[in-house]
Image (cartoon, rainbow, N blue to C red):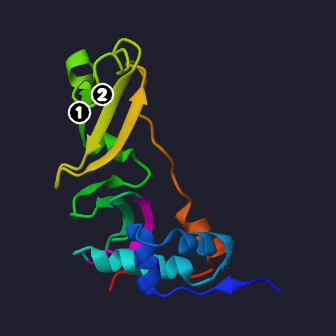
Amino acid sequence: MKKVAKYDKKRIAELIDGTLEFYQLKDMMSSHKDPERFEIYREVLQDRVSWDDPILLPYGLHLYIVQKANGDRIVKCDCGHEFCDYKENWKLHARIFVRDTEEKMNEIYPKLMSPDPEWQVIREYYCPGCATQLEVEAVPPWYPIILDFEPDIDTFYNEWIKKPLPTVK
């Protein structure tokens, strides 16, 4: 018989915050997932934001795919800034700082230990609403800004967690 561990909102919040002890984290990762875990995770995230649009999926640190009242699914930041439709590339709507010179690289790397800006640049993506750093990429200077992934939300809810999508209250 498979051991299925059940975790409450407090334990899931500790997981999100990174405050679990190693043995607790190991036990959580080693056990079979309880069917309610994603919903509890989503509830904890929802409780932490000030807006009411239901979170469908976490999209990254501080980013979520949410359902708007009109049915649109968009990428939204913790602060409430709305980027774009979740099928678009949210990075194109972010503030971007490109470290493309030695001086800019040396702000974060010791001299002689930074990438050569002719071979690699560092792109930092920030929320226009709260200035939270959302992502960092180290890429060749000519590399396009790419969409990380486009989740199939309907399949996830219908076939994986077998629950209805959260609705606007």
Depth check: 87 or 63 in front? 63
Residue 40: image x %, image y %?
A: 47, 82
Residue 84: image x %, image y %?
A: 32, 53
Depth check: 99 or 111 in front? 111
Q: Is residue 87 located in the magenta-colored stretch of the structure?
A: no
Residue 131 versus residue 3 in the image, above or below: above
Q: Residue at x 29, y 24 (%)?
A: 110
Query: Is tag 1's residue or tag 2's residue first in the polypeptide sequence?
Result: 1
Q: Amino acid at mark 2?
A: Tyr
Q: Quadrant of residue 65?
A: bottom left
Q: Is residue 54 located in the magenta-colored stretch of the structure?
A: yes
Residue stretch rendered in magenta on the structure: 52-59
Res 97 label: 1
Residue 19: image x %, image y %?
A: 40, 71
Q: Quadrant of residue 105?
A: top left
The secondary structure type at the circle numbered 2 is loop
Q: Residue at x 42, y 69 (%)?
A: 16
Report the Cα–Cα distance between label 1 and label 2: 16 Å
Q: Amino acid at mark 1?
A: Phe
